[in-house]
Amino acid sequence: MSFEPDIKSQSKQWFLVQSILMEIDFVINFCVNPRLTAGLSSEQITFIKSLPEDWIYEWKLMWGENSERKYVLETAARLAECLFGEDYQKASLFLREMTYSDLYEKLVIRYPNLQSKIKSDLSVDEKIINLFVQANTQNYLSLGFPIETINRQTNSLKNNIRYALRVMADGDLTARFWMLIDRFYYQFYNSYRETQKEKMTKLERKVLTLLDTKITMKNLSWLPAQNALIRQSELTKAVEDGKRKICFWVEPFGLMDSWLLEDEYILISFAEAGSVYEGFISFSEDVAKRSSALGDPTRLLILRLIRNFGMDNTSIAAYLGLSRPTVSVHAKILREAGLITSEKQGREIKHQIDINEVHRLFSDLKDFLDLPE
């Protein structure tokens, strides 16, 4: 059984698809990583904030200490070939009943030329990881992606596969995970999604109006400049050479640059670069402002000095051989960046490092750059 469209047998170069599993994955990431909501509409942010705190807390516990971005349902669906469709009950049941042995058998049929490269003494779950990672590498290499780029994303892919396996039939998180997801979908997301259908219908109409059977980069010129088909040269060439068909992902969030490479197609979102892009720019400006406060060795020394015990301007100036006004200027920059707090004590101003804000800056920078693990 497969949920994927029969792309090979059709002459059409593009498809319109929906993916309820990817949608839920995105919402969960928005909840666990609030910084990702920067470009969402006020309506979407209101929806996320309306979710019960105990649900989000429970998800963060399951997600892990650092609340790293994970694509659990997306990865599970890619493995099991049930990525497309808006029928949650059908797709989720298919995943939660999928055993490791059945999944490995599906992958062997899908990638028969790679089975011989998998060590026979590995456990079934490790065989699945190794086989899919090799297939992913082969897929990217076939389109000319540099091996360095592929290697950078491999650890992230492995982590996503390991977590995805934990929510399938043989996994240790199956019952807990699906109980939480079912509650979220039936109590919250299903009704919210109904309010987004008009927006999604407009997106569908846009593609149907602008495209015919054949695809060229010229008739994709309506895509926003941030779209991966425009900015990612390997994907652009794959489309021009007819090596991959395009699955236009109709989604409710207004994503303009989300993409996924599979064996036969490129899955791509295609919304206009509106509020999402503006939020992304705003986020970048905020991170840049805070990061710039660290771009001076004197300010780094001040942070080092006050990391354990607060110090006042006079003590810092004496230690660094600077004037008090100079220390005050540096402290003002650090304070405006949120990295320190200052308190007047008598005639002196005492400074203390805000450890949480320093950690947040590094976390935000990592999120902004979307660095793999």
Image: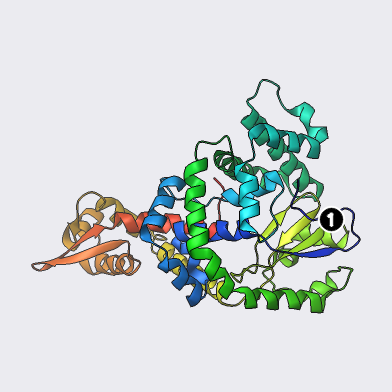
Which quadrant does the N terminus fall into? top right
Which quadrant does the C terminus fall into? top right
According to the image, what is the colour scheme of the structure?
Answer: rainbow
- Seen as rendered, the residue at the extreme top is 121
- Seen as rendered, the residue at the extreme left is 346
Q: Residue at x 41, y 56 (%)?
A: 55
Q: Residue at x 65, y 46 (%)?
A: 94
Dot 1 corresponds to which residue?
A: 7
Query: Which is nearer the eye, 87 or 288?
Result: 87
Residue 221 screen position, x and y as percent: 78, 75
Residue 368 screen position, x and y as percent: 52, 60
Query: Which is nearer the eye, 329 or 3?
Result: 3
Instruction: Left or right? Give the position of 112 relative to 171.
Output: right
Q: Residue at x 50, y 36 (%)?
A: 172
Residue 144 screen position, x and y as percent: 79, 50
Q: Residue at x 73, y 53 (%)?
A: 261
Is 347 located above or below residue 222 in the figure? Answer: above
Residue 245 visible? The answer is yes
Is 278 located above or below residue 142 in the figure? Answer: below
Query: Which is nearer the eye, 269 or 302?
Result: 269
Q: Check disc 1 and report its element: helix, strand or loop.
A: loop
Residue 170 appears in which quarter of the rendering?
Answer: top right
Is 204 located above or below residue 184 in the figure? Answer: below
Q: Amino acid at mark 1?
A: Ile
